Image (cartoon, rainbow, N blue to C red):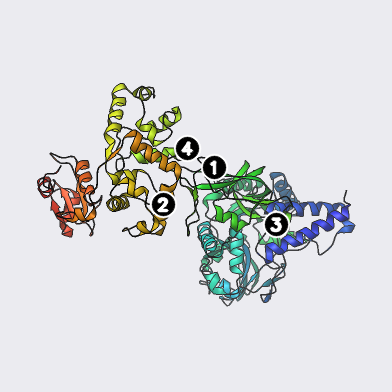
């Protein structure tokens, strides 16, 4: 068992290490709550063993170390830290101490947000911004003047009246969550890494050697107080001074409130805690200050903290825990998502047992191993995320995470196309994880057009075990359909009729129905026109695919991965050979071009017709190489419509697009309907 002095020495050493990472490197390993717990433990030990106290202890210092790469600026008034409290009991104790010191005078408190950013001191001389510095060690900060000048919300000159000759203005530089997400996306793409949280992004951005880098980081700023003021008359009220700063053109938070009782401060705390995730930026609590400047001066300071203010912190958003294993989940569209299974922790009032790892690139970025100790972050209703690995705690038993080559659900090959970060199962027709989406797409009107089979019926057929793949849909028995709740005999018969009718279709509809990634209606037409029949399509190679219009590298890869996957091939041939799906023979492109008025044209079909169904016109035109679209544009060659009062008709007239009615289309196609 360690002696008190050994415990104190160990804590001081750990705190110095983590302060260096936090303040100098802007790259903390541990969550704030763990740092706070070490500080609390060290304070307890130093109080119990006062002979072991030391002025260089983290409990006595105001800030962290300064970086040597920046110049120094001495603060005219120290930039103090705040005492952190974590419960209502400690808040009541703070209130009692204040009242006792002030001999029960009537007190007003100013409640503010505790923004999770980087403390900054601005110096204005005759209304002009001349210097800016970080908190540093509380007495001397880093010169960040050039970088601060790039923050749009900080004015280079103050406007209005009553501007002091010299004034120090304190505030917090931070980054909005939307800007943080954008910045992290850029960093992951360009550098393969990301900031752990918005606070580190703000700190890292403002402490850049190149101000141009800071300028591109979209930093923001809120004032929270004053330092030294010379030759100026300001209010004796803290909140009124904040309002004066706003009049001079400086930003302050709208969430600032005067309360007359500590219970009202608690109400403010609860309201902000409830709405903290709607603010658009990170906060980790509220700050409660005595509003009277006279009272503040009377209360004074203790070591590194004022007696007149306290930070009431929220429950932690970050904690550390251990990764026990990694499971790979398959989404409805085949996306493979790695999920970390954690040693359970309680975070933000919720028991956390797992956290998303997003994709293989994220695992590579984190350099994550199983058995690693990691920092978990949860904000609002966001799924918990692994923010970083505490590499100093990595055990000898840790092992690398191996991304699977095959789908954990159906054993089909997993594809990861060059230039994409997402991995997907290629067995779309066979994968149980994807079958809801697969069947829904397969029966849709633009695919096999099986009427009556909607989302609810698909869900029930799958739940009952009647349909496992799209091939099973064609083998469904009417009696099983009737067993589905709410489905009458006639409705069941209509579904059977629709299924049987859909067996006679076109190659382009069938290809589209397969649900191959990035193969839409237009690509399906191009593929059908090129390969003519399903046998040729199934034998396609990369070189033949990329020669086809609109088929690029990625689409070709998706097609190949799909048709080469044995599980998909099995179901496709089952549909053709066992189910009896008949695909109408498609003429070669040369044959189509001969005496074909419409080949290669873009056509829009609008409204209903007397003698023909719109679906029949569409199917016939597609079979001869026509590209059907839903909306009129400058690229449209023809509109087929019987009505002249529709929006499409009017737009086509304005654009000078040729309009054909039902009789004309029949004649042009030589009545081959």
- Residue located at (61% from left, 43% from top): 354
Q: Secondary structure at mark 3?
A: helix
- Kindly identify which residue carries mark 4: 432
Q: Which residue is rendered at x = 61% and y = 66% of the image? A: 204
In the image, residue 641 sits, relative to residue 193, either above or below, namely above
Q: Position of residue 511 (x, y in %)?
A: 33, 46
CA distance for labels 2 and 1: 21 Å
Where residue 391 is drawn, which disc sits there?
3
- The answer to which image quadrant residue 225 occupies is bottom right
Q: Nearer the viewer, residue 206 or 242?
A: 206
Query: Mark 1 highlights which residue?
Result: 408
CA separation, marks 3 and 4? 38 Å
Dot 1, crowdedness within 10 Å: few (<14), some or many (≥20)?
some
The tag earlier along the polypeptide, 4 or 2, is 4
Q: Which residue does the numbered mark 2 point to in the structure image? A: 560
Dot 2 or dot 1: first in sequence order is 1
Q: In this picture, is 483 found above or below 418?
A: above
Frontmost residue, 414 versus 322:
414
Answer with left or right where residue 75 lies relative to residue 283: right
Specify whether 525 is left or right of 381: left
What secondary structure is found at the residue carrying circle 1?
loop
Left or right placement of residue 403 versus residue 515 in this view: right
The Cα–Cα distance between marks 4 and 1, rounded to whole angstroms, is 10 Å
Where does residue 151 sit, x and y in percent of width and height?
A: 53, 69
Disc 2 versus disc 1: nearer the observer = 2
Q: Is residue 213 above or below residue 187?
A: below
Helix, strand or loop at mark 4: loop
Q: Quadrant of residue 610?
A: top left
Task: Tell me residue 574's x, y (percent).
Answer: 38, 37
| Label 3: how many Cα within 10 Å (few below 14, some 14–19, many 20+) | some
Closer to viewer: mark 2 or mark 3:
2
Q: Earlier in the sequence, mark 2 or mark 3?
A: 3
């Amino acid at each position: 068992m360690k002696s008190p002095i050994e415990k104190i020495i160990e804590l001081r050493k750990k705190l110095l290490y983590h302060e260096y990472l936090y303040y100098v490197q802007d790259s903390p390993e541990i969550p704030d709550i763990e740092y706070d717990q070490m500080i609390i433990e060290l304070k307890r030990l130093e109080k119990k063993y006062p002979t072991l106290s030391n002025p260089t202890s983290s409990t006595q210092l105001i800030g962290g170390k300064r970086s040597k790469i920046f110049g120094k600026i001495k603060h005219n008034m120290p930039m103090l830290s705040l005492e952190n409290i974590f419960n209502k009991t400690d808040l009541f104790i703070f209130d009692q101490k204040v009242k006792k010191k002030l001999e029960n005078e009537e007190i007003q408190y100013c409640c503010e947000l505790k923004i999770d950013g980087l403390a900054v001191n601005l110096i204005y001389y005759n209304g002009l911004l001349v210097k800016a510095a970080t908190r540093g060690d509380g007495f001397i900060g880093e010169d960040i003047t050039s970088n601060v000048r790039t923050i749009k919300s900080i004015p280079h000159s103050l406007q209005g009246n009553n501007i002091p000759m010299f004034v120090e203005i304190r505030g917090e530089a931070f980054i909005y969550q939307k800007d943080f997400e954008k910045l992290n996306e850029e960093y992951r793409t360009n550098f393969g890494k990301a900031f752990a949280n918005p606070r580190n992004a703000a700190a890292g951005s403002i402490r850049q050697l190149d101000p141009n880098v800071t300028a591109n980081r979209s930093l923001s700023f809120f004032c929270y107080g004053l330092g030294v003021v010379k030759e100026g008359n300001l209010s004796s009220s803290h909140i009124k001074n904040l309002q004066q700063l706003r009049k001079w053109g400086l930003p302050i938070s709208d969430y600032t409130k005067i309360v007359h009782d500590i219970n009202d401060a608690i109400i403010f705390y609860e309201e902000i805690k409830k709405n903290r995730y709607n603010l658009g930026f990170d906060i980790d609590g509220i700050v409660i200050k005595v509003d009277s400047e006279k009272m503040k001066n009377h209360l004074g300071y203790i070591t590194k903290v004022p007696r007149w203010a306290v930070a009431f912190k929220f429950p932690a958003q970050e904690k550390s825990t251990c990764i026990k294993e990694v499971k790979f989940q398959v989404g409805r569209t085949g996306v493979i998502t790695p999920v970390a299974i954690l040693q359970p922790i309680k975070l933000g009032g919720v028991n956390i047992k797992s956290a998303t790892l997003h994709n293989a690139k994220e695992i590579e970025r984190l350099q994550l191993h199983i058995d690693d100790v990691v920092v978990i972050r949860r904000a609002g209703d966001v799924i918990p995320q692994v923010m970083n690995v505490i590499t100093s705690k990595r055990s000898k038993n840790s092992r690398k995470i191996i991304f699977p080559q095959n789908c954990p659900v159906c054993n089909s090959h997993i594809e990861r196309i060059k230039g994409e970060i997402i991995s997907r199962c290629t067995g779309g027709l066979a994968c149980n994880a994807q079958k809801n989406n697969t069947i829904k797409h397969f029966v849709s009107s633009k695919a096999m057009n099986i009427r009556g089979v909607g989302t609810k019926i698909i869900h029930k057929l799958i739940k009952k075990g009647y349909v496992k793949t799209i091939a099973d849909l064609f083998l469904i028995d009417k009696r099983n359909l009737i067993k589905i709740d709410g489905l009458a005999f006639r409705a069941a018969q209509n579904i059977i009729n629709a299924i049987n009718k859909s067996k006679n279709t076109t190659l382009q509809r069938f290809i589209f129905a397969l649900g191959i990634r990035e193969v839409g209606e237009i690509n399906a037409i191009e593929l059908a026109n090129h390969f003519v029949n399903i046998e040729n399509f199934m034998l396609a190679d990369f070189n033949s695919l990329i020669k086809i219009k609109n088929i690029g590298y990625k689409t070709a890869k998706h097609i190949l991965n799909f048709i080469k996957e044995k599980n998909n091939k099995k179901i496709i041939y089952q549909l053709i050979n066992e189910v009896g799906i008949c695909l109408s023979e498609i003429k070669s492109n040369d044959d189509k071009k001969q005496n074909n008025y419409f080949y290669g044209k873009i056509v829009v079909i609008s409204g209903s017709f007397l003698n023909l169904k719109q679906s029949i016109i569409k199917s016939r035109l597609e079979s001869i190489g026509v590209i059907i679209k839903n909306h009129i544009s400058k690229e449209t060659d023809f509109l087929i419509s019987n009505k002249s009062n529709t929006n499409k008709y009017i737009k086509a007239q304005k654009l000078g697009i040729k309009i054909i009615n039902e009789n004309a289309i029949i004649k042009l196609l030589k009545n081959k309907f």
